[in-house]
Amino acid sequence: MDFGQTPEGEKVERHVLTGGGLTAAVLTYGCVIQSLEVDGVDVVLGCDTLDDYLTRSRYFGAVVGRYGNRIAGGRFDLDGVTHRLARNNGTAALHGGVRGFDKRVWSASAVSDAITLRYLSPAGEEGYPGELSAAVTYTLADRALRIDYAAVTDAPTVLNLTNHSYFNLAGGGDVLGHVVTIDADAYTPVDEHKIPTGELAPVEGTPFDFRAPAAVGARMGGAYDHNFVLNPGGLVRVECGDRVMEVRTDQPGVQFYAGGMLSPELTPYGPHAGLCLETQHFPDSPNRPGFPSVVLRPGEEFRSWTEYRFPMR
């Protein structure tokens, strides 16, 4: 169905998927997951209108890229060439820049329980090299939302795609009482600008130890916006009352953000209205040779997957 037009006159569509006991609404603007109903309860934060997504969204439900998270100084070197990116978070490039993938209109092909969205990012967009062809598929099955990412490039580039949905398993209120478990022995500490120091620090003995279940608000006032280094096959689990969400991925990290910077003056939601679990490569990886590589070259195909499952208790 029609969901309006962007200021540039691009038509935005809204598609409703049903399958596996779930119902999801997906927008072609930003690949946004507008809603995700589990047992009749919408467990993601969304906006009611396109205008709100254009002016009041903090990446609600969107795919962010080309590079999710931060790149320090808005620059990186690749094959001896320095690439300067659009800076939109102090001196850093965040979530793809001023107009990243979350602010683009994608083409869509949908069936009842799945949708594939595609976007062709021209060379030089937001400063990133190479023309990049990206595809994202959302599939509902077996009480799970699965996300499959794919991309190819015609020149060496860097890539880190993720989804920025905010989850609230209660369907309202704040998430400070949600109980989180993250199978990660280490995390990436950051400086005052939220740029990684390059260290992989043990979580043991710190407020970042979620290897045993802990409430979001039990430590640090819930002020989490950090990348966790997942153990191989590592599981993330969120519990709220009778509802459970399990997150699995083939990516090496997950950004746990507890929504502390949401503001009712700027968005439809207040602080801690939802939490994000952005499966990803580590922040600032293009400038950190000790981190897993995010380089994509011609002739290669980037593929990754993430699954958000809601098992019965």
Image (cartoon, grey):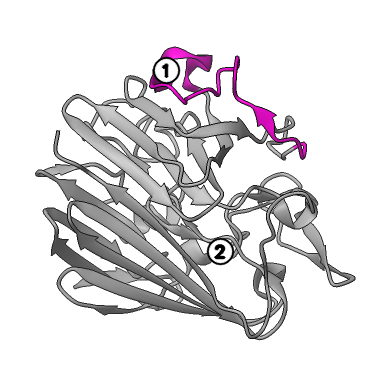
Dot 1 alpha-carbon crowd within 10 angstroms: few under 14, some 14 to 19, many 20 or more: some
Q: Main secondary structure of the magenta part?
A: loop
Residue type (three-letter) at the residue carrying disc 1: Gly
Instruction: Give the camera-side residue of 307 and 50.
Output: 307
Mark 2 / mark 1, whichever is N-terminal: 2
Percent x, y for residue 35? 24, 52
- In the picture, measured across the screen, residue 60 lies left or right of residue 189, that is left
Taking the spot 65% from the left edge, 47% from the top edge, the residue there is 283
Q: Quadrant of the C terminus?
A: top left
Instruction: Give the camera-side residue of 18 and 244.
Output: 244
Percent x, y for residue 47? 30, 50
Dot in front, 2 or 1: 1
Taking the spot 52% from the left edge, 24% from the top edge, the residue there is 223
- In the picture, measured across the screen, residue 242 lies left or right of residue 53, that is left
Percent x, y for residue 236? 40, 38
**Which residue range is magenta in the image?**
197-222
Kindly identify which residue carries mark 2: 100
Taking the spot 38% from the left edge, 28% from the top edge, the residue there is 180
Residue type (three-letter) at the residue carrying disc 2: Gly
Dot 2 alpha-carbon crowd within 10 angstroms: few under 14, some 14 to 19, many 20 or more: many
Kindly identify which residue carries mark 1: 217
- Quadrant housing residue 140: bottom left
